[in-house]
Each structure stands twice: as structure tokens, then as C-alpha cells.
Image: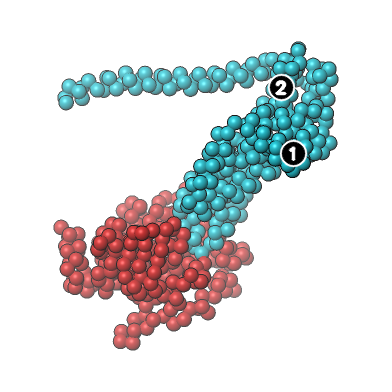
Amino acid sequence: MVRAAQRNPSANSVSDRIAGKSLTLAALLVAALILWVVVDVLWQGAGRLSWEFVTTAPSDVGRAGGIAPMLVATMLILAVCLAAATPMAIATAIWLAEFAAAGRALRLSLDVLAGMPSIVFGLFGYVFFVHMLGLGFSILAGGLTLACMVLPVVTRACEESLRALPDGYRLGCAALGVSRAATLWRLQLPAAMPGLAVGIVLGIGRALAETAALLYTSGYVDRMPTSFSDSGRALSIHIFDMSMNVPGGDRGAYGTALVLLVMLIGINAVVFAISTWWSETRLEQA
Amino acid sequence: MNHYEQLVPLHAQSRPVVMDADSGRRDYIVTRALSMHYGERQVLRDISLQVAAGRITALIGPSGVGKSSLLACVNRLTDMLPGAHVNGELRVGGVDASHAATDVIALRRRVGMIFQKPNPFPLSIWNNLAFPLREHGVRAKSQLTEAITTALQEVGLWGEVKDRLHAAALSLSGGQQQRLCMARALALQPEALLMDEPCSALDPIAVGVVEELIARLRGRYTMLIVTHNLAQARRLADDVALLWPRDGAGELVEQGPAAHLFDSPRAAVTAAYLRSERI
């Protein structure tokens, strides 16, 4: 026992150091990978980037001109997706976290849905939105398909952030005779807002990156969309098309990828800013 | 006009509390044959408890015997606990409170609750009190100010926080947080306070301050306090009720004036329980 106790500290410190170093290495590797992608996109795409690039329509099948129609189509698709998914996700999350002790079946199906390949959602969207509901290849069909796709991710993230709140809020409010609706609206949702924002940002990330599900729901017409029932080409599809189908389209693809990256960061910043503002003003006025 | 008038008029709903003709004692909280289950498991059996108006009643007994559950029955917080099921009679302030149709919002306004762990909301000190007041209809700034000031003074917190009412309540110390929670309950002008081991999460100095506050509130509120600490029960309680487990469920073995129960307990388990504490 004594010998073991004597030996252990040094053995521990060696294994501790090895473990510590390998964890650091793993973290550095991940960071390097991300940095590599960002630098690569910046390096290759920056030369293509200009005011013209984001404000004009493509010409010569994308080799020249800009990406304005895709930018607009992407924003419209994302707007439809968020408008449909966010309220539904938050409502479902509230129900799961607050009212459904036995929501196991729904939770399980959400987890299964979250792991479903996006091409399956695309197929569903093609059959249901494009054909059965007769929306055709349109921004509406694409946005709603994406909404189905991000719904499980956003719902589960929102549910977790509501569940993470101390029970003392809920019981404390009840014990003060504060109604359940007021507890939710004035206290729980504002307090959970940072977590809800993370959920929404996760959804936005997935939606902006999506290509497969949009190919056969919103289509890939590169005209400027004039309404939600127009077909529109998302930036991700444009990247795919430029790099796979257009010889000499690589530079355009990188430029588009850079715009997509900047857009993702910009939208996330806006979401966090809005959520912080909403949470603070709500809690201040509670 | 003070803020009481904005609140639900309590006494319009209350009927006279139960009066014992012999002693002149009025019971504010009365349970008869109250039982409680969590799912299949019985946690309380046949509890017939009387809590005298304006007095401090300590609810004592070993851990897990159902003291906190009994407290949750009184303000119907049991409605919010999944799987909890209560039978039997509960009268609060002379009103039947065991009915499914009971207005629990009004009941909980009349019967405040203090939890074991201080649970201030993630709001400013001011809003911790203003939020429930607003929800109960007190909206005018002057009335809010009056109610909040009075409640903070009542718990002795006013002097400590009056210059930083808009600071986060979570920045207060544990003892201050607990007194803030008491002020939050008192601002609603309740008739009774249920306290679930209100001092167990506090340091000794804070315990002294909170105990002193509870003693000061004697006579103005009916107080039912769960405590593990028999010394605290001796210091504070006018009446004591002992819960003891039998076949896994808590039963009320003895209740009465603190002096009688501590000095000459009738039940053998009470005597044994009190003896075990002295050793």
C-alpha cells in the first residue's frame, strides 16, 4: 500500500501529462482544421469578392457576373424556414419541458428525425410540398422542407435550455400565485433565451448549408426570384453547380462560399444580439 | 390608497376560521385524514393536523418522512408535482382548499411559501418583488414602491439594499437572498407562511438573522415551518407536530404546544426521537 502510494504520484503525473497533452493536441487539431477551411475559402474566394459580385446576376453560366439572385433566394428560403420552424419548435419545446412528463415517444422521434439524411427530407418535400400541395419547385417548398429538417434540432436545443432552468423558478412562481403563462412568458423564456438562440443558430447553420434537400424542392433556376412561389437557387446549390458542372467555375464557387460564410456569421451575430436584447428587456420589465 | 386594495380582497373570500369553543384557539390550517401518494407509493397517511392562527408550528420528524410533501399539500403545489395524488380534507382559513375547483392562485396568495434553497428570480432586487405584485394586479409605481419598501423593511433588508434596488438579486448573499424571498412572499400580504427548512442552506450568522425575523413575524402570520433542527424548533415553535414513518408513509404521531411535547411527550416514539437528539 505504502509503495503504491509512493509510486502513484509520479505515475499519475506522467499519465496526467500525457492525457493533458493529447487533449490539447486534439483541440488544436480541430481548431487547425476549421482554420484551414476558413483560410482556404478566404484565400481562394477573396479575389472574386466585389460589390458587383453580390449585386449582379450571373452570366456565362456563373463564370462571370455575380450571385445576387442566389443571395436573395437563400435569404427568402431561410426566412420561410425560420418563420415556420421557430414558433413550432419553441412551442413544442415548451410542451416537452413543462407539460409532458411522458413525452418520450415524441422526444425519441425528434432524435431520429434529427439524424435523418437530408436527402430523405428532400424526397419528402418533393412528394409532399412540391406535388401533393402543388407548390411546385419554389422557395416556399424549399423553405418548408428545410423547416421540417431543422425542426428536431431546434426543438431539442430549446427544450434542453428550458429544462436547464432551476426548478425554483417554476415552483417559486407557482407558490407566489403567478400563473403558468406569466411564469413562462415573463421569466422562463427570457431566462432560457440564450439557449433558445443557440438552438435557432444551429438550425440556421443547417439550413444555410443544405444542398441535397433543396435540389428537388426549390430547384436551381438562377433567375432573380420575384415571389415565394418562384423557383430559386440557394447559394449552396450554386457552389455545388459551379464546382461540379461548370468547367472553370471554381473561383466563382469559392467566392460564393465566402459570401455564405460571411452571411452565416452575420446572421448568427444578429440572432444573438436580438436574443440578448429581448431577454434583457423582458427580464427588466418582468 | 395602499397596495392591499389592488390585491384580491382576501377577507371577502375567507370565512371565519375554525374556532375551538373551549380554548378560544383558532386553527388557520386544518387537514383531516389527508393522504398523499407519488404514483403507487404512499408518502403520507391519515394526517389530521391543526395549525393555529398567528402561531408558529414546527413540523419535525426524520428525513424522508414527508414533511415537505405535507407542506406542498397545503398550498397545492402538489398539483405541479408529476404523479402526486392527494386525498382527504384540507381547509385553509376556513375555506375548503382540497377541491379540484379551488382557486389555487388565490390560495397561494394567501399562503406564501419559503423554500429550503433561496430561489430569487434572475431579476433585479426590485423586480423580484414587483413581478409577482404586478401579476396580482398592483401596477401603479407608487403602490409598487410602497409595497416593496414595506416588505423589505419587514425582513430587515431595506437598509442593506436600498441603494442598489436595481442590482441583480443573485448578487446578494445566501442569507440576504432568503430574506428577499421572504419579502417577496410578504409583499403579497399573505395570511400564512409555509417554510421548508428555511435556514438549512444558510451560514450560522444568516441562520440567526432569519430565525430572529421569523420570531418577529409571530402573531402576524400563521407559520408552519419544517425543520430538521430540534434546537431551532425549541427556539421558535409555539406548537410542534411530529411525523413518523410507518410502512414507508409518514403519519402524524403527536402534536401540541411545544412546551408539552418537548417536556412530556405522550407517544413513545416522540420521547425516543427527542432523546436521540440530546445524545
Q: Are marks 2 and 1 in contact (CB under 8 Å)?
A: no
Q: Quadrant of the C terminus of chain A?
A: bottom right
Which residue is located at x 51 percent, y 64 percent? A177
In the image, residue A2 lies at what x, y percent? 16, 24
Identify the element where label 1 is drawn: helix
Taking the image as shown, residue B141 lies to the left or right of residue B213, namely right
Q: Nearer the viewer, residue B87 or A262?
A: B87
Whether A203 is drawn above or below A167: the answer is: above
Whether A118 is drawn above or below B183: the answer is: above
Identify the element where label 2 is drawn: helix
Q: Quadrant of the N terminus of chain A?
A: top left
What amino acid is found at the position of numbered circle 1 in the picture? His
Which residue is located at x 20 percent, y 62 percent? B273
What amino acid is found at the position of numbered circle 2 in the picture? Ile
Tell me, what hue is chain A?
cyan
Whether B104 is drawn above or below A17: the answer is: below
How busy is the neighbourhood of tag 1: few (under 14 within 10 Å), some, or many (20 plus)? some
Chain ID, red in image: B
Taking the image as shown, residue B154 lies to the left or right of residue A262, namely left
How busy is the neighbourhood of tag 2: few (under 14 within 10 Å), some, or many (20 plus)? many
Q: Nearer the viewer, residue A122 or A280?
A: A122
In the image, residue B172 lies at what x, y percent? 45, 50
Q: Which residue is mark 2?
A: A239
Chain name for mark 2: A
Q: Which residue is mark 1?
A: A131
> Which image quadrant is residue B246 in?
bottom left
Taking the image as shown, residue A89 lies to the left or right of residue B189, namely right
Q: Nearer the viewer, residue A34 or B81?
A: B81
**Disc on the earlier residue, 2 or 1:** 1
Residue B85 visible in this rendered orientation of the protein: yes
